[in-house]
Amino acid sequence: MDLRLSPEDERFRDEVRAWLETRLGGDFRDLRGTGGPGHEHEVVEGRMAWERELGAAGWIGLGWPAPSGRGASLWRQVIFQEEYARARAPGRLGHIGEHLLGATLAALGTPEQKERFLPPIARGEELWCQGSSEPGAGSDLAGVTTRADLAGDAWAIRGQKIWTSHAHLADYCFVLARTDPAERRHAGLSYLLVPMRQPGVTVRPIRNLTGSAEFCEVFFDGARAARENVVGAPGEGWKVAMATLAFERGASTLGQQIGFASELDAIVAAARARDADRDPEVCRRIADAWIGLRVMRAFALRVLSHGAQGELPPAGLGAKLYWSTWHRRLGELAMDVLGPDAEILRAPPCALAPLQETFLFSRADTIYAGSSEIQRNIIATRALGLPR
């Protein structure tokens, strides 16, 4: 794998950097550093305007094929994500629509689905959420019990989803539902595109440890989705959901790593301010974290460069387990460096310092998007061929 950029790619990086600096230095300057995990409640209207600004400039759907996107190379997608994070641009409200649903439709959707749903995402006008996890089926998605029955020209959906990011803001949700009750586990599931603003949909935000409420529980009680709004054939939902999972582990993870690097820099600064950098064990853990970041980036680039579109290569099955475990340990390191200050709130009732937020939110990393226990089972059975 050649990690060197071509002169054309370097010029593209300069273009991205200049555009971000200009826009974030003008009307959107107050949005720098807002949003993102644990902060999704911040300046929602401003960040929605920012989505439209990104769309007008053609930055949404970079990797989608024309005419919906630019058909940019993997390297250019990585460059954009890295520069976006370095500029401390606001957390994306359209991440799920662009990188999960949009990428899935670009690869597997019908021409009609692409024509209807991709342009509004690319313009930053419609937001999406993901209806996968359920109270009794979190990482084990094959156990979903949400039902969808075909009644005339529409699917009638009944069931509950949980940990649904941005559900209170979203216009649409892609829902994994059981459409053939005679089938079990992976069979009989379908991937439906469901409008959120309709009777039969109830959304309740869930307040988390950091005080924000970006996750929600969603109740479907006879909500409708048009008959044609099923991606793939009915019963092929598991295959489509696995493609979405592959895209979730895509180029945007490189931008996430820039955020991790900023957190590590803050820990180093805190260690120096408290003379904790004189402790050999603290220095060893900081060095391990720094090395881990480099390994993470090389691993992500390797997986992305060898992965076929819509498929997660065997090596990629370990990516989520690696970064989530690394980040959780980083949060623990932050608390040890802060010492007694780690237990003191900035202000009542629950104003947290940035490193406290890092620690608390990182506790969820090994649970959401596939718990570590399930990830180890997947690695064992699918990558290593071990018996269940």
Image: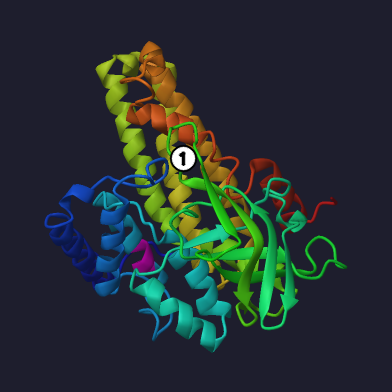
Q: Nearer the viewer, residue 262 or 183?
A: 183
Snapshot quadrant of residue 16: bottom left
Q: How many marks?
A: 1
Is 303 on the left-hand or right-hand side of 139?
A: left
Question: Can the viewer see residue 239?
Answer: no
Residue 225: x, y in percent? 61, 73
State the residue at coordinates (46%, 40%). Answer: 292
Residue type pointed to by label 1: Gly
Q: Nearer the viewer, residue 338 or 291?
A: 338
Is 296 on the left-hand or right-hand side of 318?
A: left
Residue 207: x, y in percent? 49, 37
Query: What range is drawn magenta here?
Result: 75-79
Q: Which colouring convention does the figure follow?
A: rainbow
- Can you identify the residue that label 1 sits on? 292
Q: Nearer the viewer, residue 162 or 275?
A: 162
Snapshot quadrant of residue 212: top left
Q: In the figure, 313 relative to 43: above or below?
A: below
Element type at mark 1: helix
Q: Please tell me whether residue 78 belongs to the stretch shown in magenta.
A: yes
Residue 156: x, y in percent? 69, 70
Main secondary structure type of the part rendered in magenta: helix
Q: Nearer the viewer, residue 314 or 343?
A: 343
Snapshot quadrant of residue 364: top right
